[in-house]
Image (cartoon, rainbow, N blue to C red):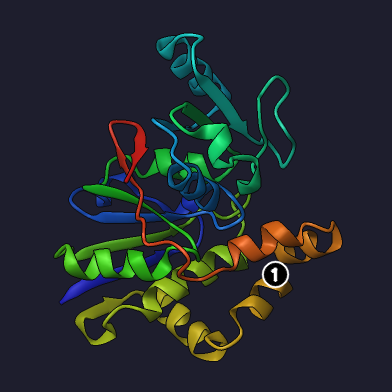
Amino acid sequence: MKRLRVLMTRQEIVPGRLAGATVVVLDVFMATTTLLAILENGARDVYPAESLREAERIREKLGPGNVLRGGEQDAARIDGYDHGPFPGEYAPEVVRDRDVIFVTTNGTRAIADAAGAGRVLLGCLRNAPAVARELEESGADSVYLVCAGSAGRFTAEDFLGAAEIISHMNAPDWRPNDAAWLAQDFMNRHENNVHDALRESRAGRWFVENDRMDAFHFVADVGASILVPEIVDGRAVV
């Protein structure tokens, strides 16, 4: 039987166990959601960077030309960078045909931590059904849904993203670990009120309290995208 595992934080990754597996990294607020938006809006090459040092190395390799840098560190904009972590900052007229280097505190580190897997995909609520289809149709028999978390702590929004993906998979074909089983139960209770569940999360409350509702609704739009980004040679591609 095919194996389905949810990891509650990136710190649960054991690199030696990922060989041959398909990993889906989820950082719903905001890295994987924003990376998806950057690709949808026509960026040329998109580089998720593990750290500021890695981002600088990539920039030096690419040269000073048509390169944008964006992201956050510890929830703050990065001095000297062009943009922050929000998808609305990467409109088509901003990113089309440009290279983008993107670095965040948790999400891009989780992507780097998963590098030893057979495949690394990027998931969020917006592409959850598409990710589920890719997992079912690709023939993968060992899947990890990795919630990036926040500074080693569980985050409800990443878990909700994993649960949404699982809800679109053919459950009898998969043997879940305990966290995946819990995600199934979580979605059974919240499948008709994903927006409400997201709003009640710690990060969701921040978006509400800080008048970031445009970004919140963008993140919460389940199934809005059919694209499934994959990490290939250090780049996010579709």
Residue drawn where x is 50% and y is 83% of the image: 187
The single residue placed furthest to the front in the displayed view is 93
Q: Position of residue 42 (x, y in %)?
A: 43, 39
Q: Position of residue 76 (x, y in %)?
A: 75, 37
Inspect this view and state whether residue 103 appears: no
Q: Is residue 138 above or below residue 106?
A: below
- Side of 224 relative to 237 (left or right): right
SS under mark 1: loop
- Side of 156 relative to 2 (left or right): right
Say which amino acid is labelled 1. Ser
Residue drawn where x is 49% and y is 17% of the image: 66
Q: Is residue 195 above or below residue 69?
A: below
Residue underneath mark 1: 201
Report crowding for label 1: few under 14, some 14 to 19, many 20 or more residues within 10 A (C-alpha): some
Give the position of the N terminus as an image quadrant.
Answer: bottom left
- Side of 170 relative to 64 (left or right): left
Residue drawn where x is 38% and y is 76% of the image: 166
In the image, 29 versus 153, the foreground residue is: 29
Q: Position of residue 215 (x, y in %)?
A: 68, 57
Q: Position of residue 54 (x, y in %)?
A: 48, 22
In the image, 72 versus 40, the foreground residue is: 40
Residue drawn where x is 49% and y is 39% of the image: 109
Q: Is residue 60 above or below residue 199?
A: above
Count of labels in the image: 1
Inspect this view and state whether residue 124 appears: yes
